[in-house]
Image: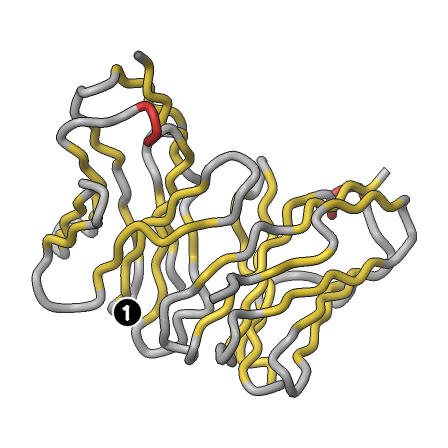
Amino acid sequence: KAGVTQTPRYLIKTRGQQVTLSCSPISGHRSVSWYQQTPGQGLQFLFEYFSETQRNKGNFPGRFSGRQFSNSRSEMNVSTLELGDSALYLCASSLLTRGEQFFGPGTRLTVL
Amino acid sequence: AQSVTQLDSQVPVFEEAPVELRCNYSSSVSVYLFWYVQYPNQGLQLLLKYLSGSTLVESINGFEAEFNKSQTSFHLRKPSVHISDTAEYFCAVSDIRGSQGNLIFGKGTKLSVKP
């Protein structure tokens, strides 16, 4: 069974640009969560989707948004990139919202 | 709101020695507790979890953790570590009333096992 896949694995952008990251959950999983990992702030919850609906949102500015498609694949978008957005963005999927989360390898975003 | 404190940012230890990685949490509601491990350039893997029942939980690779409600702790232990255990370990909690898709993580502890 294939694991959670995230594309791209690495990304370099400049300040002011926008970026879209993609996450394909494990087949059959309907819940997808996103986290940001930085050396300073650690792992922080961004948002959670279940059946195309956002269920929870972390304390991030409105520049961070996401969505989930009918096939459970999810995307997150960051607009007007700032240097501080440089991070590893992790996606996790679970069968249900109360199930064990399986993490993908992450997308490393560098903002120059 | 919940918070998680991992008291040690780095723990160096020699191979075959015992290790304890400490985790304390703060919450006004009941929580589920988790330990995740992250190897270099990889995502997180669930090591073990406490949802209910026995307060001592074990993983398949020799780690164990004990939930102590009075001390609000969930320390991770292994009696004898291997070089391959070198990784970063994260303690996390989630509100039992909500989904487990919203995890609150500690800052992590880097375990370095030396030969």
Classify the position of the C terminus of chain A by image quarter. Answer: top right
Question: Depth check: B24 or B53 in front?
Answer: B53
Colour scheme of the picture: secondary structure
Q: Tell me which residue sits at (42%, 39%) in the image.
A: B108
* Residue annotated with mark 1: B29
Q: Where is residue B18 drawn, in percent x and y?
A: 16, 25
Q: Is B38 placed above or below B86 here?
A: below
Could you tell me which secondary element the residue under label 1 belongs to?
A: loop
Q: Tell me which residue sits at (63%, 83%) in the image.
A: A71
Q: Where is residue A14 drawn, in percent x and y?
A: 90, 44
Give the quadrant of residue A7: bottom right
Q: Where is residue A26 drawn, in percent x and y?
A: 52, 70
Question: Depth check: B52 or A57 in front?
Answer: B52
> What's the chain of the residue with tag 1?
B
Question: Which residue occupies the extreme top position in the image?
Answer: B115
Q: Tell me which residue sits at (65%, 58%) in the image.
A: A6
Question: Depth check: B36 or B26 in front?
Answer: B36
Q: Is B44 placed above or below A39 here?
A: below
Q: Tell me which residue sits at (19%, 20%) in the image.
A: B16
Q: Would you call the spot at circle 1 few (<14 residues within 10 Å), some (14-19), or many (20 or more)?
A: few
Give the quadrant of residue B80: top left
Q: Amino acid at mark 1?
A: Val
Q: Is A21 placed above or below A15 here?
A: below
Question: Which residue occupies the extreme left position in the image?
Answer: B54
Left or right for B66, reference A90: left
Give the quadrant of residue A35: bottom right
